[in-house]
Image: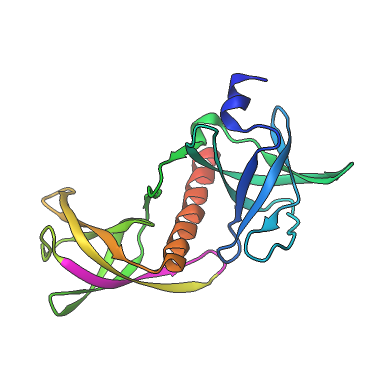
Amino acid sequence: MTKETHMLLNVNQMIFIEKLDEEYIIYKTRVADIHTKYFSVEVPIDIKTGSFKPLKEGEKVAVSYTREDGIQFQFFSTIIGSSIGNIRTFHLEKPEPKSIKKIQRREYLRIPVNVNLSIEHKGTILQATSKDLSGGGVSIVDEERRFTELDEVTGVVMLEFKNGKQERVPFRGTIARIILLHNDVKAAVIEFTEIYEAQRAAIVRFSFERQLEIRYKTSSC
C-alpha cells in the first residue's frame, strides 16, 4: 500500500457521500477496494431512511471520512462506473492528494461567492452582497461602514442551486470583525449565532457545489 493510498482511505473504511445534484441527503457506505486511479464502494445507504441508493456514472459527489486518529477529511469526486461481482460496487475517481481538505470539528469550508442577503441592523433593513460564505457565517461588503464589531444582526441568505432550486436561510448573528478590502472599502464578517441546523446544512451543500465548480474550472484551465 502506497503512502498516498494510506493517507486517502482504507479498505472496509466507512465513508459518507453527498450527491450534489439533489436536496441535502447523506449516504453511508464502505470502501470495497482501492486502485491506482479510482476506489470502489458498496451500494450507499441513506442514513435517515436506511434505503439503498445506487450511484450513476457522471454524478458529482462530496466524500467525507474520519481517520483512525479522529481527524476528518473531505474531497470531491465523480462516479466513473460500476461493476457486479460478489457484490455490486461503484467506482469513484481518486482525488489529487492536495485536493483533500482536513475539516476540524465545527469548522466550515469558506467559499468566495456572491449571494444576496437581507439584513436587519439597528431597526433598518439593508440589502447586501456576500464576499464569502460558509456554514459558520458570511462576509458582506460594507461600503457605507454601517457596522461595528459586536453589533447584532438578523438576516436571510438567498441561495440558488445549480438545479434551479432557491432557498431562504434565516439567521441571527454577530459582527465578529471588520476587515479592510481595497480602496478603503471594508467588509463585515458575520458569525451565525442562531440558525436551524437543517438550513445550515443547505449552506454547506451550496458551498460544496460551488467548491466543486471552482475545482473543475481550475482543472480545465
Q: Residue furthest front?
A: 69
Kindly report the secondary structure that dominates the magenta region of the rendered protein: strand
Q: Nearer the viewer, residue 50 or 60?
A: 50
Give the percent coordinates (x, y) of residue 135. Answer: 39, 57
Give the percent coordinates (x, y) of residue 57. Answer: 74, 51
Image point (67%, 39%), residue name: 93
Image point (53%, 64%), residue name: 162
Residue extent of the magenta highlight: 152-163
Residue 192 sits in quarter: bottom left
Magenta segment: does it hold 14? no
Q: Residue furthest top?
A: 2
Q: Is residue 66 above or below residue 188?
A: above
The quadrant of the rendering that contains the N terminus is: top right
Q: Is residue 93 visible?
A: yes
Magenta segment: does it hold 159? yes
Q: How is the image coloured?
A: rainbow
Q: Is residue 187 visible?
A: no
Residue 30 sits in quarter: top right
Q: Is residue 148 above or below residue 221?
A: below
Give the percent coordinates (x, y) of residue 36. Answer: 70, 27
Left/right placement of residue 39 relative to residue 208 reads right
Image point (64%, 55%), residue name: 27
Give the percent coordinates (x, y) of residue 106. Answer: 38, 50
